[in-house]
Image (tube, rainbow, N blue to C red):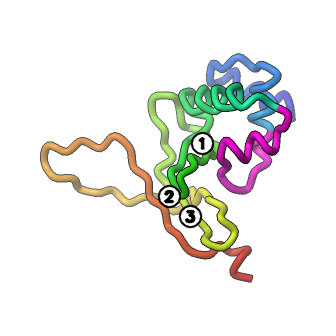
Amino acid sequence: MTQDIEHRLKNRQVNPTAMRLLVLDFLTKQTAAISLNDLEKGMAPSDRITLYRTLKTFEEKGLVHSIEDGTGATKYALCEQDCDGENHHDLHVHFYCNSCKETFCLPNTRIPELALPNGFKQQEMNLIIKGVCEQCSK
């Protein structure tokens, strides 16, 4: 498992430090997107600044994408394999559960292409659906 994570970092030109290996391993075990606070709690007693810089490096290199789900806290989730630092290909819908307060990536539910008026240039796109997740519906 550690070799897979180390390979994933090296593949994106990220130096596999001990902290980066631990953070990426932690992220691979998550079922929902997590905030910096969640990461800090899950990896206590880690330094918040180091964790933040690690997430930003991962985002710049296409390992994670950030999600603004309307809660006021940016959440992070692993990117698809074909993302890179220049082009994130995570144009999928995100789902925020009003019950458990978790944010989920729905990679098989793509954001539809939108026609913008002349002169408008898209830089990023984010679509959040809010409701009740499968687990909370039971």
Q: Of the residues shown, which amino acid type is indicated by label 3?
A: Phe
Q: Which residues are magenta?
A: 26-45
Residue under the image location 71 percent in, 76 percent down:
136
Give the CA distance from mark 3 to mark 1.
Answer: 16 Å
Instruction: Say whether residue 129 is visible.
Output: yes
Between disc 3 and disc 1, the foreground one is 3
Q: Which residue is mark 3?
A: 95
Quadrant where the C terminus is found in the figure = bottom right
Q: Is residue 25 left or right of residue 126?
A: right
Give the CA distance from mark 3 to mark 2.
Answer: 11 Å
Quadrant of the image occupied by residue 44: top right
Q: Which residue is mark 2?
A: 70
Could you tell me if the residues under marks 3 and 2 are in contact, i.e. CB atoms within 8 Å? no
Quadrant where the N terminus is found in the figure = top right
Quadrant of the image occupied by residue 60: top right
Element under label 3? strand
